[in-house]
Image (tube, helix red, strand yellow):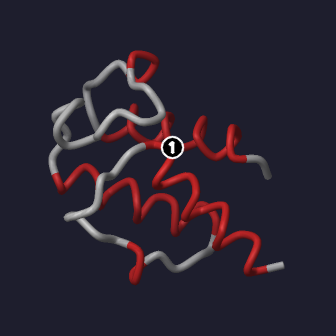
Amino acid sequence: MTIDEIKKDIRDMLNDVSEIDTDAVGDDDLLFDDVGLTSVVIVQVFVSCQEKYGISMHDEINMAASVTMNYIAEIVYKKLNEKE
């Protein structure tokens, strides 16, 4: 699975749990500050990623970090590669 495929899945997950236009969200936009998402929405995305990909991201959920599409996608990508 590529990073771009993971980002598409994350956008789909965001569409499911929020009212934002994810096509307008850049890969490096801060999901809290730039996009205005809440921590609840971000946690829902992390949980959805865990369920979809069968990975654990508990140690990587850091709400103080600059959470972006790239940030989440890179964590998922790393975890998927660790599973192989």
* Residue 63 in the figure: left or right of residue 70: left
Q: Which residue is mark 1?
A: 10
Numbered disc 1: secondary structure: helix
Look at the picture and state if 46 lies above or below 33.
below
User: Hey, what amino acid is under mark 1?
Assistant: Ile
Asked whether 17 or 3 is in front, the reply is 3
Residue drawn at x 23%, y 30% is: 35
Residue 29's x, y, as percent?
35, 33
Residue 26's x, y, as percent?
43, 26
Residue drawn at x 51%, y 46% is: 70
Look at the picture and state if 37 lies above or below 56.
above
* Residue 49 in the figure: left or right of residue 16: right
Q: Quadrant of residue 78?
A: bottom right
Residue drawn at x 51%, y 43% is: 10
Residue drawn at x 40%, y 83% is: 59
Look at the picture and state if 35 lies above or below 57.
above
Which residue, as the protein is rendered here, is positioned at the far right?
A: 84
* Residue 71 in the figure: left or right of residue 63: right
